[in-house]
Amino acid sequence: MTVATSTRVQALRRAADPLVRFYTGPLYRENAARPGICDFAFGNPHDMPLEGLTAALRAHSTPRNKDWFAYKNNEPASRELVVRSLRDRDGVPYEPEDVFMTNGNFGGLAVALDAVVDPGDEVIFNSPPWFFYEALILDRGGVPVRVRVVPDSWDLDLEAIARAITPRTRAVIVNSPHNPTGRIYPPDTWRALAQLLEARSRAAGRPIYLLSDEAYCRIVFDGHRFESPALHYPDTMVIYTYGKTLLAPGERIGYLALPPLMARERREALRPALFVAQMVTGWAFPNAVLQHALAELDALSIDVARIQHRRDRLVKALRELGYSVHEPQGTFYLLPRAPIADDWAFAERLARHDVLCLPGEVVELPGYFRLSLTANDEMVERALPALAAAIR
Amino acid sequence: MTVATSTRVQALRRAADPLVRFYTGPLYRENAARPGICDFAFGNPHDMPLEGLTAALRAHSTPRNKDWFAYKNNEPASRELVVRSLRDRDGVPYEPEDVFMTNGNFGGLAVALDAVVDPGDEVIFNSPPWFFYEALILDRGGVPVRVRVVPDSWDLDLEAIARAITPRTRAVIVNSPHNPTGRIYPPDTWRALAQLLEARSRAAGRPIYLLSDEAYCRIVFDGHRFESPALHYPDTMVIYTYGKTLLAPGERIGYLALPPLMARERREALRPALFVAQMVTGWAFPNAVLQHALAELDALSIDVARIQHRRDRLVKALRELGYSVHEPQGTFYLLPRAPIADDWAFAERLARHDVLCLPGEVVELPGYFRLSLTANDEMVERALPALAAAIR
């Protein structure tokens, strides 16, 4: 009697292996909680939370009626708020019935995949990817298809995506601003991708959905502008979480939205499917307090200028020290090249100097290391001598 | 291009059809929000929330360190608290590593099924069931196998379960105290079920898991005592939510726990599988504030004596009016027979008298109707003349 678990969960455990190895291994476990460590490993907060977040949570924890903590799903007030937020951002009128409230982008992605992917359907994602795309696809019985982005420019490789599409392709996942490269794909990229997906959807006789992970859409630098592919490709699902602007991934609220560009008939077919998927993925809806607080939460943000300042400080200093590093246009991450080929060994070397980073292999970029700009300024200053020592 | 959604989600939409039909249909939509309605349809609150809940949420919304709202998963403090809570309840020492924090029982069930069910595996559930067992099983590619409980006694039909088990049986879902019959299965039932499952697991060469949905384990009446099957069958997964004692299903926290009776080797095989399943089902972990507040939440409860009093009032009055109704030992529900065969028609008749109930067909019990005892006392008093008029 050896088969204790499902084979699916074994497969997706393997897919998440580099992350699980890092997260449960000694490098992270022995260093993350160590006093004096400069922790750049994940996009976790290293300053006290936003006061506005605390105020909003406290205010909306006080019930105003008997239904305050009753079952919540796609609450009409939440949907209206998201419609206003997307109108302000994109200038187009989303419909409230096309907004599906989620407990963050894990939930949003799981719901989207559940609603459209049948076993054997292929889902393309771009590498380097967010940690869990592959596991989420596998969990729905889908076949993950990995396409590398263009090295150094970190642009989407549209020709490689075109080659990867087959009649079984059901969805393509994109992420802009892109974790971990910080690249914001321009409208031209979306237009070319839309042309490609429209042609191949027509050929296949069924839609290829574009799942647009827009977690970092408000974390942009230098006046860069994020434009959603939902303005260019009708069969897009916008997937958003407030976890980045609030820097509070432990209080989870986000949404999935179908754009007005999508044919009404298709949206009407997807609406009940998405609602059922929200339930069966394990109740993917955000909690009551967060939905009550959404108007305040939507207006709140960490100081992105300060993240940008941290990026500037680190990019300049890293280059002066001899590191090769590009300048991200958004997100929380820097992605320097490790000065030695073995990025795990280099991460261990950095840890001995009290700097905790993510080895590039964990995000399918061996030879690089990822630094999260959510580390605080004091950590940045203390890290610079360590980064200097580690490259010597 | 007609195939907008996955066939899986279409199948489970059909499995949830009676509930979706009720929840989105005119009977519920036109009546639930109507002033003056006595709403007995769902286990939702009809009195103001517990003051202790508000106090706990507010207190723990104030951050005490920078990590207050950071990513939370199976937090050590939460696990320790659950271990203490289960030791107090069951008298056995669960291990912290065997406790998996969830956002309620939707999440707990999805995680359990994800971790052990392969496509084609059969999962037995007892009918009348909770609304979503069948859909949750289908969503993991499992084959739902329905076994009716014994009519009138509402006991588990162990012989029928024995007949339903095949070499592909991977799990059996039980729910005690049972929604909607209010039946608490006695230890003898668990012992007999354990014998059966042990023999059939041995024969099949792999474990048949018992998924024990214990959502209502603290909502018991008349000094009845709930005893968990985890004390009798080693391969049990205990699945619990605080949503019932707190009567706050919109603020979701619960857990899945592997009992110390389960072989250590099996627990060690399940631990990483459950952790991965918690992530890929869409981040099934409870939010930060709820985990911080767990010690207070675990000690809080609605007034179960008052629910029992409401049961007594209604059972007595219903019987006097000529309804046939048994006396539930626990849960939030009464299950009278409808005086006419068509329970939807009877529910509509009741709604015209300002009483909203759940037609029995929605819980696979045509000819019955379900009344939730979470309605408030004032609703109960106003409902009695309506129930009198409806049976005339």
Image (spheres, coloured by chain):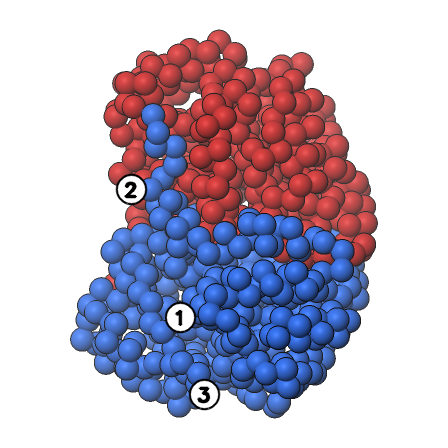
Chain colours: A red, B blue
Could you tell me the amino acid type at mark 3?
A: Pro
Q: Residue at x 62, y 19 (%)?
A: A92
Tag of residue B186: 3
Q: Position of residue A358 (x, y in %)?
A: 49, 37
Q: Which residue is mark 1?
A: B127
Of A275 and B207, nearer the camera is A275
> Can residue A202 be spotted in the picture?
yes
| Numbered disc in front, either 1 or 3 | 1
Between the C-alphas of marks 2 and 1, the distance is 28 Å
> Can residue A355 be spotted in the picture?
no
Tag of residue A119: 2
Indicate the secondary structure of the residue bearing disc 3.
loop
Say which label, 1 or 3, has the lower sequence index.
1
Q: Residue at x 45, y 29 (%)?
A: A266
Q: Position of residue A377 (x, y in %)?
A: 70, 33
Q: Is B176 above or below relative to B63?
A: below
Q: Residues within 10 Å of mark 3 (few under 14, many from 20)?
A: some
Q: Position of residue B78 (x, y in %)?
A: 60, 64
Q: Residue at x 44, y 83 (%)?
A: B152
Chain name for mark 3: B
Of the 4 image quadrants, the one containing the C terminus of chain B is bottom right
Indicate the secondary structure of the residue bearing disc 2.
loop
Q: Residue at x 73, y 46 (%)?
A: A292
Q: Are marks 2 and 1 on the same chain?
A: no
Q: Is B57 above or below relative to A335?
A: below
